[in-house]
Each structure stands twice: as C-alpha cells, then as structure tokens.
Image (spheres, coloured by chain):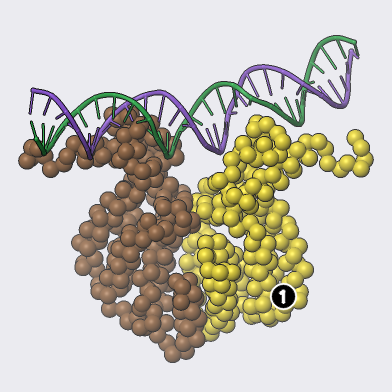
Chain colours: A brown, B yellow, C purple, D green
Amino acid sequence: MNSTMNTTKAEETRSRILSAALELFREHGFEQTTMREVAREAGVALGSAYYYFESKETIVMAFYHQAQDAMIALIEEALPKQKSLKARLRTILDVKFQYFEPNRKFLGALLGHTADPRNPLSPFSKETRDIRDKDAAQFAKAVEGSGAKVPDDLKQHLPNLLWMLQMGLILFWMYDRSPGQKRTAVLVDKSLDLVVSLIKFSGLPLMKPVRRAVLDVVRAVSGD
Amino acid sequence: MNSTMNTTKAEETRSRILSAALELFREHGFEQTTMREVAREAGVALGSAYYYFESKETIVMAFYHQAQDAMIALIEEALPKQKSLKARLRTILDVKFQYFEPNRKFLGALLGHTADPRNPLSPFSKETRDIRDKDAAQFAKAVEGSGAKVPDDLKQHLPNLLWMLQMGLILFWMYDRSPGQKRTAVLVDKSLDLVVSLIKFSGLPLMKPVRRAVLDVVRAVSGD
DNA sequence: CTCTGTAATTGAACATGTTCAACAGAGCAT
DNA sequence: ATGCTCTGTTGAACATGTTCAATTACAGAG
C-alpha cells in the first residue's frame, strides 16, 4: 500500500471503465455504445465491466451522481450573486444546461425513459429519489433567498413544482434542434416570467378558489 | 378467390400474428413476450413475424391505431349525452381508461417511452402525429359542444392543452397502484375542476397579464 | 515460505431482437 | 408445360446485454 496512492487498484479499474464508458457515450450516444467496446477501451474483459457495474444503465447512474455533486457546487457558488427570484431560478437552470451540454447526445438515454417510474434511470424512480430530493432542495433554497412572498400552503409544494418545471425544460432542451437551442432559451425566459407572475397573483384574495383547485390537484398527485 | 373470403391469405396471417402478439402482451406484458413466442403462438416462423411487422414495437403501433378507431366511435356516441364541459371531458377520459384497462400491463411499453419524441411509440413522435391530431380534435369537439366561454386567444391552444393533460392523467393511471386506481379517479376529478375553474377565471380583466404569460409559454413550446 | 480465502478477472455461453439468403408457391405470359 | 416474377415463408446467423463457472492475483495467517 503506497501511501501516495489513495485509490486501490480496484478503484482505479472501476474508474477506468467509467471513464471509457462516458467518453464513448458522449461520442456515440448510449444505445450505440456496446459493453464490449467499453471493456475494450478500458483494457479489461467484458466480464470485468459487469463486475463493477451491475448493468449498462448503472454506469449512467454513476455519471448522474457525479454530475449532481458537481452541479450543486456550481450552484452554491453562483446563487448568492443573484437576488431576484427569476435570476436565482435562471442561475440553477443555466448551470444545468451548461453542465449537460457536452453530454446531450447520451443524456437522451436517461431522459428517454423519463416517463416510466419503474425504469431505474427515470427521474421518478426510487433509484433516483435521492437525486430528486437534493435537486428540489436547491429550488427551495433559491426561493428562500429571494424576496418573493409565497403563500404558506403553496410554499410547501413549490420546490417540487419547480423541479417538475425544470424536468420539462430539460426535456425540451434535449430535443430542441434549433441552433444553440435558442427555442429553449426563449421558453426558459417565458416560463420564469410565468412562475413569477403566478406566484405574485396567487396571493390575491380573489384567487382563493383557483389556489384551492391547484392545491387539490397537487395533493392528489403527491398522494393526499 | 372465394367471394365470401374478404381477407387474403396474407391478411389472415398478419392478423393471426397480431392477435397472438396482443394476447401475449396482455398476459405477460411487452418486455416479457419474445418474438419467438409470438411466432410460435401464431403458428409461423420467426421470420414471418418480421415480414409483417418491422419490429416488435410496430405491433404495438398497430394496436394503437385499432384502439383509437374504436375509442373515437365510443366517444362520438357518448359525448352528446353530456352538456357541461366537465362532464364532456370526463366522458372522453372514461372511455379511454375503460378501453385501456385490460391492456394496462403492456400499455406501459408505449408510455415508458413517452418522453422521447424520437421513439416511434412516443405520443410526441412524428409516427404518432396522426393519432395525436385526431385525439386533440376530440377535445376540441368536447369544448365546442359545451356552454363554456373560452377567450379567443386561448381557444386556439385549448385542445392541445387538454390533450397534454390527458397524457399526464393516463401516465398517472398507468402507474397508479392504488386499488381500482382510486387515486387516478380523484386526480381526474380535481384536474377537471381546475380546468373549469381556470377557464372561468381566465376571462377576468385582472388576469390579463397572467393570460399573456401563459400564452407566451404555450407559444414558445409550440414554436412561435 | 506456503497455504488459504477473498477479490478480481476472464471469456465462453445464453437470451432475444433483428437480418438475410434461400426456398416455396401461386399466378401469368409464352 | 415451362419459365418468370412477386409474395410469402423459413430458420440459421448475427449483435449485444447479461450471466457464470473457472482461473488468477494477492494479502494475510501459520
């Protein structure tokens, strides 16, 4: 055990497989990349890849965890610089889009299964619950630190609603073929305007019945 | 060519393969069913299944077309009996849930790929555009025939918005594990209340800025 | 140093969606 | 009848995610 070597041989092998896989995923996409290629590129036998990663999807999962840690750090650094709710929310989204940009091609593999909560890669699966919760917490923080006045009953659900909006926007971005994903940029801007507008109006007394109807739906979705 | 036989031999073979596949899909689900089983059950060789259907997914597509024709007929029959917007919308949803009920198990295959518009089975793919448009038309009809007063600018987008809501509800129903899908029933009810409520309030002069913000988002999504 | 058990590693084997070259049969022209 | 073409049919072969029994490497016990 060399004291300068803080990674065991096994960890080094695992990391080599992960790197090879992510590089191939980025280059050729998830579906196009075969586990045999990954193994070959990593300089190991096919079986070794499966010794370290339960499945091809598990590798994507490892990337996702890695990515979230990195993005949370970036967000925590950038968030305090912004004061308004809109700017703070945009900060979070900007970090994500920027981080995901080089991975667009293979991130589709993750997002393609979005709708099936049984698929481990789905943002709604139990396997991704941890990621989901940490993500929503970022939005809670973004709202906290802004001057926005949010009605109490709404406040409880707002982070999850914003997380949902984020998923929609990322999905849109993913398949946005316009140059530089210009359409996504427009949509993000309009969406944030809408969010701010809705929050502002949600406090109006006249809006009571609508607020109630919205919250009824939210509660029905999240299970009473 | 016997005149009493309005199906050629080929059509009969194709139909036998489709029936066998759908039965197996219903019984064991989409993923669990192998093309070899389908071929065996239909009494043909593996290759024949691929002669008639480009892929396993194509078979699901055939089912979807069949299903839509049947459901449109059911809706056209039931719709005139209802007057209020809520009741008319619920009629459409009820028909769908009832029709899909025996197919819950394998419909997941369709819905699991919902989010990927490149997947032919996605409700957002170009392959399903026809189905999507016909579906939205049903919602347009449901709104038309009700007494609901819809602002002009909103009216244009309402069918698509309702179609979207429907997709969300079907998705929820799909993975709703509560007995008798009770949670979905509650969600449908609350959602329809919300829709009616939103339409009512959308006409208020005070709501002008919100309406504008919503429509901006809708336009950004559908591409200006 | 030798032995022994655990961790790593290997590649053959398997399951299954898909492809394809070959073959069969039916209708039709010569 | 013979040959030709088009449709339909076949099953072997292929690609690839995954499994697994066998093998090797190695760290620690004696």
Q: Position of residue B86 (x, y in %)?
A: 64, 78
Left or right of A60 on screen, residue B69 = right
Residue B85 appears in view: yes
Residue B51 lies in quadrant: top right
In the displayed structure, B25 sits above or below B87; it is above
Q: Residue at x 56, y 65 (%)?
A: B173
* Figure disc tally: 1
- Residue farthest along the bottom direction in this orientation: A205
Q: Which residue is mark 1?
A: B145
Q: Nearer the viewer, residue D24 or B61?
A: D24
Residue B17 placed where, x, y %?
Answer: 70, 41
Instruction: Between residue A89 and residue A122, name the one nearer to us.
Output: A122
Question: Which corner quadrant of the image does residue A198 belong to?
Answer: bottom left
Residue under the image location 17 percent in, 39 percent down: A8
The N terminus of chain B: image quadrant: top right
What's the chain of the residue with tag 1?
A: B
Residue at position x 29%, y 66% in the image: A138
Kindly tell me whether residue B53 is visible in this rendering: no
Q: Is residue A32 left or right of residue A100?
A: right
In the depicted structure, whether residue B94 falls above or below residue B119: below
Residue B60 location (% of width, % of height): 63, 48
User: Residue A24: percent from the left, percent from the top?
Assistant: 35, 37
Q: Residues within 10 Å of mark 1 (few under 14, many from 20)?
A: some
Query: In the image, what residue occupies the spot 93% across and 40% down?
Result: B3
Residue at the far right: name it. B3
Left or right of residue B209, residue B129 in this image? right
Amino acid on which the number 1 mark rests in the picture:
Gly
SS for tag 1?
loop
Taking C22 as reference, is B199 left or right? Answer: left
Front-most of residues B223 and B175? B175
Q: Is residue B217 above or below residue A201?
A: above
